[in-house]
């Protein structure tokens, strides 16, 4: 990444130098050469200057050839217009480069913030982990690409390596950090979600507040959800196969077409889950 940025920087410097050289040559040409090429004696004879046209003797003025003063004035006007044109062109190019520099600066700053936050997630101090998650949430709102990158990091943080072969050994994040990560998922922009749905399989989310979260089409298979609050959550087509959700709350949760096969739902609350729960696949689930 660093080598690429240096190469891009060298290319931009070279391009800027070439544009400055072209502008300098163009300005010199506009000042010394072009006026003489664009304005000739024949042009002034066919279109005499305003001062000549409004002279007292109009007929005589039209028949007289233009003087050196008229030619110099016309060339000066052309020169002024060309210099103004090149100045406007230079200002436009400078503005474009300034915008490009601002964009690259923001990108570099975002990458630096992202890298620092990811490093802090590995800290032994829960407070630093929570601060890193809040920083990642700010980064996630900057662009769809950053959003997907942050989601991938947060899922890995919650799984803590549990995306390997299914097992019953849960590797969980600290409770304060896990709650902050779930809050980030709850507040995310759903229209920026990647095509690959959220995967929290075999993750310990027990006793966390996931109320109102949107985990449609997500995978929670084999997850530990004991005592988790899913009130008002959207779990459409979610996969909770073989999950343990003893005492979990699914009050008013949308479980339409969710998979609950083999899940342990002992003492779980489904108040007002209604028709959505009736469409869920609860085959061999323990309720």
Image (cartoon, rainbow, N blue to C red):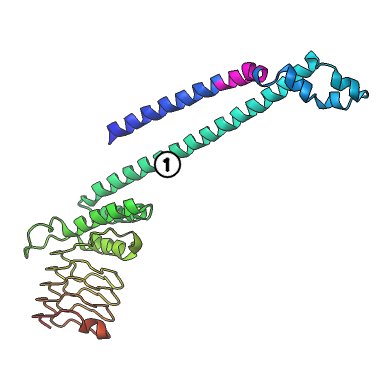
- SS class, disc 1: helix
Left or right, 20 with respect to 204, comes to: right
Give the residues in magenta.
26-36
Q: Position of residue 171 (x, y in %)?
A: 12, 60
Look at 81% across and 15% down and name the residue there. 67
- Place residue 152 in its image quadrant: bottom left
- In which quarter of the view is residue 189 placed? bottom left
Asked if the magenta segment contains residue 198, the reply would be: no
Residue found 75% across the figure and 17% down from its top: 71
Estimate the x, y position of residue 180 in percent, counting from the top left: 28, 62
Q: Can you name the residue that lies furthest to the right here?
A: 56
Dot 1: few (<14), some (14–19), or many (≥20) neighbours within 10 Å? few
- Residue to which mark 1 is pinned: 103
- Is residue 93 shown left or right of residue 60? left
How many numbered marks does the figure carry?
Answer: 1
Question: Looking at the picture, how far across and down is residue 20, in whole percent?
Answer: 50, 24
């Amino acid at each position: 990444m660093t080598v690429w940025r240096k190469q891009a920087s060298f290319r931009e410097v070279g391009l800027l130098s070439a544009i400055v050289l072209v502008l300098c040559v163009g300005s010199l040409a506009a000042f010394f050469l072009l006026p003489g090429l664009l304005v000739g004696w024949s042009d002034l004879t066919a279109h005499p200057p305003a001062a000549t046209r409004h002279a007292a003797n109009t007929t005589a003025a039209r028949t007289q050839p233009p003087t050196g003063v008229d030619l110099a004035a016309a060339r000066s006007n052309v020169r002024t217009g060309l210099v103004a044109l090149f100045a406007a062109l230079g200002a436009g190019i400078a503005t474009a480069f300034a915008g490009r520099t601002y964009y690259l600066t923001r990108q570099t700053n975002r990458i630096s913030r992202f890298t620092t936050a990811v490093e802090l997630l590995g800290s032994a101090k829960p407070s630093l982990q929570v601060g890193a998650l809040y920083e990642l949430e700010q980064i996630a709102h900057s662009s769809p690409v950053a959003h997907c990158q942050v989601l991938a990091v947060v899922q890995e943080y919650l799984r803590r390596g549990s995306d390997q072969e299914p097992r019953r050994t849960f590797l969980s994040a600290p409770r304060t950090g896990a709650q902050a990560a779930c809050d980030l998922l709850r507040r995310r922009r759903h229209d920026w979600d990647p095509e690959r749905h959220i995967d929290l399989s075999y993750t310990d989310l027990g006793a966390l507040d996931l109320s109102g979260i949107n985990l449609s089409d997500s995978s929670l298979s084999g997850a530990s959800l004991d005592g988790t609050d899913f009130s008002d959550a959207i779990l459409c087509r979610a996969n909770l196969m073989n999950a343990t959700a003893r005492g979990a709350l699914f009050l008013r949760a949308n479980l339409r077409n969710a998979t609950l096969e083999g899940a342990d739902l002992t003492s779980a609350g489904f108040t007002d889950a209604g028709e959505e729960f009736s469409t869920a696949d609860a085959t061999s689930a323990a309720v």
